[in-house]
Every structure is written in C-alpha cells, then in structure tokens.
C-alpha cells in the first residue's frame, strides 16, 4: 500500500487535488465496525494512518512541493 500512495503523491497533477483516506486504529472497536469489509477494514485504515503520519510521507510531500490545505481553504477557492 505504501508504494501505491508514494506513486500517487509523486504523480499528482499541478493544481488542487483531493485524496480521500479513511484513517483509524486497528483496535477492537474498528475491527468490529469493519468486520464485514475485509478489503478496507481496520488493518487497512491503520496502514493509511501509519503512512500518512510517517516521516517518509512528510519527506515526499516536501520533495514534491505538495502543500496540504483544509476543506475551508478549498471552499474559498471555489467561491
């Protein structure tokens, strides 16, 4: 999964992009909530969290000149 995200970040087009991730901890609560969804369950969400909070991800963001913005900032751009 890390390779997928690294490639996605490195091939973004210039401009505003949206990448939706669903992070969560791989704990009993999330395992229970996602029990019928093995392809995007608790372990997958933990892997998303681990990658997007990692030094490796921060390094890619910096190298690629990717600036994170909030939904509020996106709303202002759309006005």
Image: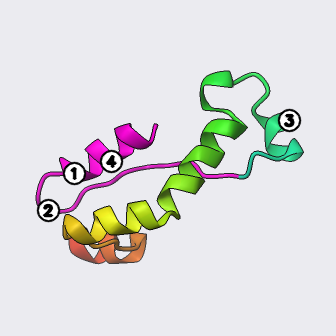
Magenta-span inclusion, residue 14: yes
Quarter of the figure that contains the C terminus: bottom left
- 4 vs 56, nearest the viewer: 56
In the drawing, what numbered circle is on residue 18? Answer: none
| Residue holding disc 4 | 6
**What secondary structure is marked by label 3?**
helix
Q: Quadrant of residue 26?
A: top right
| Residue holding disc 2 | 15
- Sequence-earlier tag: 3 or 1: 1
Q: Are marks 2 and 3 in contact (CB under 8 Å)?
A: no
User: Which label lies toward us, 2 or 4?
Assistant: 4
| Residue holding disc 1 | 10
Q: Is residue 74 left or right of residue 65?
A: right
**What secondary structure is marked by label 2?**
loop
Query: Alpha-carbon neighbours of circle 3 within 10 Å: few (<14), some, or many (≥20)?
Result: few
Residue 77 appears at what percent x and percent y?
22, 73
């Amino acid at each position: 999964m890390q390779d997928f995200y690294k490639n996605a970040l490195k091939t973004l087009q210039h401009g505003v992009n949206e990448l939706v991730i669903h992070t969560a901890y791989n704990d009993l609560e999330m395992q229970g909530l996602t029990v019928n969804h093995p392809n995007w369950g608790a372990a997958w969400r933990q892997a998303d969290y681990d990658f997007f909070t990692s030094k490796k991800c921060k390094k890619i963001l910096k190298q690629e000149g990717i600036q994170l913005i909030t939904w509020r900032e996106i709303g202002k751009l759309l006005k």
